[in-house]
Image: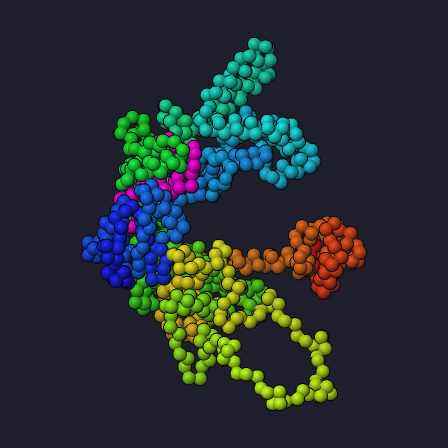
């Protein structure tokens, strides 16, 4: 815990201009981002008497180790920069809303030649028109099914579309007139795109035009005694009306607006957002958050607006945004919204009429969501705090372990041995810092040795980060011990290398008859293949330590770095042997300030190093429940990685080892010969006949297939029949 006065800047250093400030912890991670009209006043407010600060603010300033700021020219720029940094650095003390579910959208892929209507979740893609979000995917499908009578837009996947185009036969929807069948050329790309745009116009609220047009065509068909066509148009108009009835009219003036309501208590807040388009509720979603910073309703609304519209442009930002409380700087937020929309945006509190009544409904939804969340949420802030305190008490720790790392080993009968590392901070999973390892220092099944290797590799990387930043001074090796890899002196500079001896002092070369013969090539052991377990580098680094995000470590800019932050507690999946191996790995590195324990599955016992008896936590203990969740998450992450490696190994082929042979040419070879077995029997001249395969590549393919031993033939266990290699086969 840091003393804020140790890093407090002098008042003269801080400008009185608008800007954004960042608090960093001792590891240079950004833990809080804020904006201010006047940086000097705002930053100085954090360095008053700790007793006068809000408890959460007090925790933040005592966790931080430094503060820095960036001056901007306007408050709108400060708002945008604050949002950008919160998204980039993911500070632990900022309010971050998380969806209580992944909401589905109705999407129209206008970025394709033949736009497709489908249900989509997750991040929005460029060139796709979205409507919603909806509470349930089935609600979208019911609406689309009704509208396809009038707007027969393609809904099939790319594979179905290509197959129909290849065979010349449309899918079932094409036969029942719920798809215009562009796959077989019934309509041109331009006609199909026009249908898709009409579909979008109707979903955007411009409904009256199409219904009036259908009714007019229906009356005209009836006058011309085309009764079958008139009946079909009548049914089409009825389908559109039923689709409209699924979203009731809530605002009579066809308003486009978003209504945001907040329900909160001392610890948490829940938001509900209703998206009204054309006077109808077109979507609804809810967010919940821990109030990890001292923030009022206006601040919660401002954070919600940033998250809701930070990535949006154009019509995705409505003309009106109705809120329960206005942000502190309403003018700057309104200007920021207007810049994103490209037109004026009204940000206000509804006072009377239909909008006031609808806001009451949204507020009621927010209250219900908060109550439901508090009864169901296993990660309740009070519960998490109690769990961490119970763990600290049971293990004899000085403080609650705010960062816990758990390790698990997974393999299948000694093959594809892997390990996982999961991270929980403040009792919640931090998936962005999960890591996974391949155990390659040895072969075979040995969980204890694997655990020792993984812990050693992980914390060698941690020591290297500390050494690079100057936070760690290398301890001298004990008598009789080998020096730590980081302590090995560097090679001498060329100027310091002693001169070569005089030729007269050089002993004569041995006679050829005295030179032992070179070993036969068959007797030379091959260099270890990476898959066979090459020894780890002396400095402990290993390219096989993988980050599921692909993050490659950053400089000290506040962003997450690989293996750079130490936990207060290391948990291993296993009993006394695994715990001893983990403790031994830490001792070998000179790390003695990280606690270690193990959780055995059999009786859920907690094992500590050098203790013959386990610690038994009560079955109703929140601390035991948290340890179980950490252990189960590590097991899930490890077994998922192990299965993916096994599946990849099963799908491997001798052609994978041919340098310069890509996936396209591999498929061309298999397609030409029918199977790897037949390709192995082909001559180099026959391989050269495949388009794109030259003689040098053909020779490499033939050599790789000759070197690879054929797989053992598959046997039908019911009949004893030896089965031939299949056509797509790998050997």
Instruction: Indicate the position of residue 6 as horizontal and vertical percent values.
Output: 25, 62
Left or right of 680, for residue 297: left
Residue 326 lies in what quarter of the image? top left
Instruction: Name the one closer to the observer, 99 or 59.
Output: 59
Residue closer to the observer: 16 or 327: 16
State the image coordinates of residue 157 (x, y, percent, origin top left): 59, 38
Q: Which residue is found at the position 69% from the left and 37% from the top?
A: 166
Q: Is residue 421 left or right of residue 95?
A: right
The span picked out in magenta is 291-320
Quadrant the N terminus occupies: bottom left
> What residue lies at 29% left-to-right and 26% top-to-bottom?
353
Magenta stretch encompasses residue 298: yes
Where residue 257 sits, quadrant-wise, is: top left
Name which quarter of the figure residue 616 lies in: bottom left
Residue 706: x, y in percent? 74, 63
Q: Is residue 627 left or right of residue 350?
A: right
Q: Nearer the viewer, residue 451 or 129?
A: 129
Say if residue 446 shows up in the picture.
no
**As displayed, is residue 41 above or below residue 153?**
below
Name which residue lies at 51% across and 37% down.
127
Front residue (pair 481, 20): 20
* Figure quadrant of the C terminus: bottom right
């Amino acid at each position: 815990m840091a003393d804020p006065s140790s890093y407090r800047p002098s008042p003269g250093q801080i400008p009185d201009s608008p800007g954004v400030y960042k608090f960093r912890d001792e590891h240079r991670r950004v833990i809080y981002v804020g904006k201010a009209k006047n940086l000097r006043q705002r930053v100085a407010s954090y360095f008053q008497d700790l007793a006068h600060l809000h408890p959460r603010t007090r925790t933040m300033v005592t966790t931080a180790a430094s503060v820095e700021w960036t001056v901007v020219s306007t408050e709108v720029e400060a708002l945008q920069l604050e949002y950008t940094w919160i998204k980039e650095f993911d500070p632990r003390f900022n309010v971050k809303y998380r969806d209580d579910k992944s909401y589905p959208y109705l999407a129209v892929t206008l970025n394709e030649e033949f736009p497709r209507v489908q249900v989509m979740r997750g991040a929005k893609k460029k060139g796709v028109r979205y409507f919603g979000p909806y509470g349930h995917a089935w609600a979208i499908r019911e609406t689309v099914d009704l509208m396809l009578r009038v707007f027969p837009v393609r809904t099939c996947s790319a594979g179905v579309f290509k197959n129909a185009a290849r065979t010349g036969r449309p899918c079932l929807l094409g036969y029942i007139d719920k798809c215009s069948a562009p796959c077989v050329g019934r309509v041109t790309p331009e006609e199909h795109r026009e249908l898709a745009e009409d579909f979008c116009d109707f979903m955007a609220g411009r409904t009256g035009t199409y219904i009036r047009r259908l009714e007019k065509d229906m009356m005209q068909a009836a006058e011309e005694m085309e009764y079958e066509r008139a009946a079909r148009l009548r049914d089409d108009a009825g389908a559109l009306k039923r689709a409209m009835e699924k979203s009731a009219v809530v605002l009579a003036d066809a308003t486009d607006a978003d209504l945001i309501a907040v329900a909160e208590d001392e610890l948490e807040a829940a938001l509900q957002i209703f998206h009204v388009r054309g006077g109808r509720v077109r979507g609804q979603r809810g967010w919940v958050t821990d109030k990890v910073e001292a923030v009022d309703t206006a601040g919660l609304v401002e954070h919600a607006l940033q998250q809701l519209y930070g990535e949006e442009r154009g019509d995705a930002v409505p003309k009106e945004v109705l809120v329960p409380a206005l942000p502190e700087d309403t003018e700057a937020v309104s200007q920021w919204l207007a810049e994103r929309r490209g037109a004026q945006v009204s940000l206000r509190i509804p006072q009377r009429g239909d909008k006031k009544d609808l806001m009451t409904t949204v507020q009621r939804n927010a209250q219900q969501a908060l109550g439901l969340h508090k009864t169901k949420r296993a990660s309740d802030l009070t519960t998490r705090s109690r769990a961490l305190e119970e763990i600290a008490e049971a293990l004899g720790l000085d403080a609650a372990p705010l960062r816990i790392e758990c390790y698990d080993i997974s393999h299948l009968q000694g093959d594809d041995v892997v390990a996982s590392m999961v991270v929980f901070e403040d009792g919640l999973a931090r998936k962005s810092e999960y890591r996974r390892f391949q155990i390659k220092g040895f072969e075979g099944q040995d969980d204890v040795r694997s655990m020792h290797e993984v812990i050693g590799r992980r914390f060698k990387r941690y020591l290297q980060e500390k050494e690079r930043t100057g936070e760690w001074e290398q301890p001298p090796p004990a008598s009789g011990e080998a020096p730590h890899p980081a302590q090995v002196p560097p090679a001498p500079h060329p100027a310091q290398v002693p001169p070569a001896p005089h030729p007269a002092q050089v002993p004569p070369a041995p006679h050829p008859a005295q030179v032992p013969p070179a070993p036969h090539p068959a007797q030379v052991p091959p260099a270890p293949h990476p898959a066979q377990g090459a020894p780890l580098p002396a400095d402990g680094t290993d390219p096989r330590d993988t980050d599921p995000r692909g993050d490659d470590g950053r400089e000290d800019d506040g962003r997450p770095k690989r293996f750079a932050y130490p936990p207060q507690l290391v948990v291993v999946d296993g009993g006394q042997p695994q715990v001893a191996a983990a403790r031994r790995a830490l001792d070998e590195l000179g790390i003695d300030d990280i606690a270690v324990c193990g959780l055995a599955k059999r009786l859920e016992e907690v094992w500590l190093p050098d203790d013959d008896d386990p610690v038994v936590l009560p079955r109703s203990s929140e601390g035991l429940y948290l340890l179980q969740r950490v252990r189960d998450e590590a097991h899930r992450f490890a077994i998922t990685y192990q299965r993916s490696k096994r599946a990849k190994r099963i799908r491997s082929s001798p052609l994978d080892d041919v340098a310069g042979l890509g996936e396209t040419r591999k498929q061309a070879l298999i397609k030409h010969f029918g199977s790897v077995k037949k390709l192995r029997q082909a001559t180099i001249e026959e391989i050269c006949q495949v388009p794109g395969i030259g003689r040098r590549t053909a020779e490499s393919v033939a050599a790789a297939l000759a070197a690879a031993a054929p797989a053992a033939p598959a046997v039908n266990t019911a009949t004893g029949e030896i089965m031939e290699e299949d056509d797509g086969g790998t050997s």
